[in-house]
Image (spheres, rainbow, N blue to C red):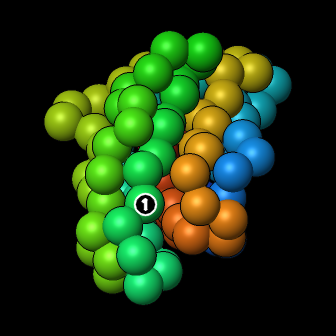
Amino acid sequence: MANTFKNYTDTGIGTSASTSYTVATSTTAVMIGMTVANVTASQIKIDVQCANAYLVKGAAIPSGGALSVLDGKIILETADTVVVTSDTASSADVIISVLEQT
């Protein structure tokens, strides 16, 4: 079983749900970090769902600020997704750090 550390990014997230990460076939992933940055001049609110459960809902991020979404590790199985939505168009950038086991 190979273990590989990877970062995934998603930029310009807005009011439509954006799938920022999907676990590949025959893979288990340990999500070890996730940061959402506000790239606008105004406060935004974000939702983050993981495997169809909310990690945060309506979390406020000030202009130019960032939010570290995780307070620990999360195990993700094949086809699980991480979905991010903002209340403002093209307002958020995301970086997700995972350890993928194949």
Q: Residue furthest front?
A: 42
- Asked if one can make out residue 101 in the rendered structure from this viewpoint, the answer is no
How many residues crowd around disc 1 within 10 Å: few (fewer than 14), some, or many (20 or more)? many
Instruction: Give the residue drawn at x 33%, y 77%.
Output: 63
Could you tell me which quadrant the C terminus lies in? top right
In the rendered image, the residue lying farthest to the left is: 71
State the image quarter where residue 8 is shown: bottom right
Nearer the observer, 31 or 2: 31
SS of the residue under disc 1: strand
Q: Is residue 76 above or below residue 11?
A: above
- For the residue pair 80 and 36, the one nearer the viewer reads as 36
Q: Position of residue 34 (x, y in %)?
A: 39, 51
Residue that label 1 marks: 44
Left or right side of 66 for 53:
right
* Residue located 39% across and 37% down the image: 58
Tell me where residue 96 appears, x and y as whole percent.
Answer: 48, 53
Nearer to the camera, 96 or 41: 41
